[in-house]
Amino acid sequence: MKKTVLEIDLKALEHNFNVISSKLRPKTKFMAVVKANGYGSNDIEIAKKLESLSIDYFAVAFSSEGVSLRKAGIETPILVLLPQVESFTEIIKYKLEPSLYSFYFLDNFLNFLVSKKIEKYPCHFKINSGLNRVGFNEEESQKAMAKIQNCECIELMSLYSHLAATDDLQESKFTLSQINLFKKISSNLISKLSDKPMLHMSNTSGIFNFPECEFDMVRSGIGLYGYNNHLNNELVPVHTLKSIISQIVEAQKGDSIGYNRAFICEEKMKIGIIPLGHADGISRGFSKNAYVIVNGKKCRIIGNICMDVFMVNLNDIDVVEGDQVVIFDKQNNAESFALSVGTISYEILTNLSERIERVIV
Ligand SMILES: *Cc1c(COP(=O)(O)O)cnc(C)c1O
């Protein structure tokens, strides 16, 4: 295609699903994390494909993401990791399962359920075991659970927690202490419950690096899209971002390229104009060190990245206007593109704007 497209490879998704599943005990359930439009891909197509592969659960960050999956016909249970108090009505209407993670959310949700006379609504209970982001710590868990048990309006589907550093083996002592704390808090809570909630803790790098945190279910996001923080060569990247050379500009020694004259030509140069910019998620940080692939060769990004275009050095490249440019694909993947400016694949993928057409392959 003679324009910028993001290709989404559902075969690669299936491959990654199988690779990750093969690491798990047969009984362990698989929750696919499809927040942020399926890590910048296309959450609906990803969810449909995974539903056809008998995925057990989905997770999204906000209830609006769950609503759009339901409207697209997804029937698998959906955990909403960070529901907000504005969304109670849609949570119920679309049978989404909220995470209970703060007293503010819990108290308001309990009041809402009581006022609507709703009983045994499926929810998940978030324990803070050391990430110190969202969730109840050990002491708060007791208090929160007492409130939940006080009314009949909630059925606890799971108790879960999130690990801080599963991709960093230098921090394995810390990770093991998080796992132990989660075990302690959860068994304490469960001993007082009549429900038998599932336990889950592991994200993608936890699945690969810490089998001891598998519990009853795992939550995998980035791994399904082909990355394990650092690239894992068993997995295949799902996203390919391509564009074209929409113009070739001849510049002379001493000419400046782009805004703020950030690049000055030290020789006669052939400059390629690529219709993709910071409004599309290619942040200005990429002005420094990044390169793209044109006809199999690396070309440095030069000058400041603009809103809708960026420029590359095409000296010594055999190329004409209309030729294809690969920003990242399976070989030159989003993780190495991300590393060239000191970020991670998660950020690159989820920053890709809606303006870029998604093509399912
Ligand atoms: C985003 C998220 C995940 C997925 O993590 P990956 O590293 O992408 O596998 C799992 N659990 C929670 C709570 C999350 O917010």
Image (cartoon, rainbow, N blue to C red):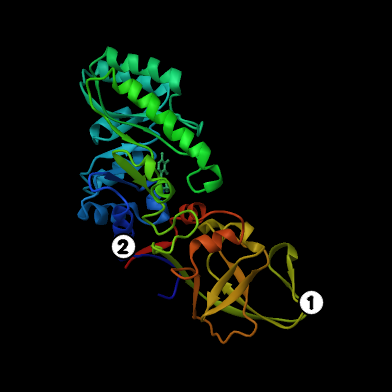
Callout 2: helix, strand or loop?
A: helix
Q: Is residue 65 visible?
A: no
218 or 270, nearer to the observer: 218
What amino acid is labelled 1 in the image?
Gly
Name of the residue lying farthest toward the top = 150
**Residue 130 point in image, percent of width and height:** 50, 31
Quadrant holding the C terminus: bottom left
**Residue 194 point in image, percent of width and height:** 22, 20
* Pointer 2 local density, CA inside 10 Å: few below 14, some 14–19, many at least 20: some
128 or 247, nearer to the observer: 128
Q: Which mark is residue 15?
A: 2
Name of the residue lying farthest toward the right = 254
Residue 293 versus residue 285 in the image, above or below? below
What amino acid is labelled 2 in the image?
His
In the image, the residue with mark 1 has its CB under 8 Å from the nearest atom of ligand 1: no
Q: Which mark is residue 254?
A: 1
Q: Nearer the viewer, mark 1 or mark 2?
A: 2
Q: How many marks?
A: 2
Ligand 1 lies in quarter = top left
Residue 123 versus residue 104 in the image, above or below? below
Residue under the image location 29 percent in, 58 percent down:
18
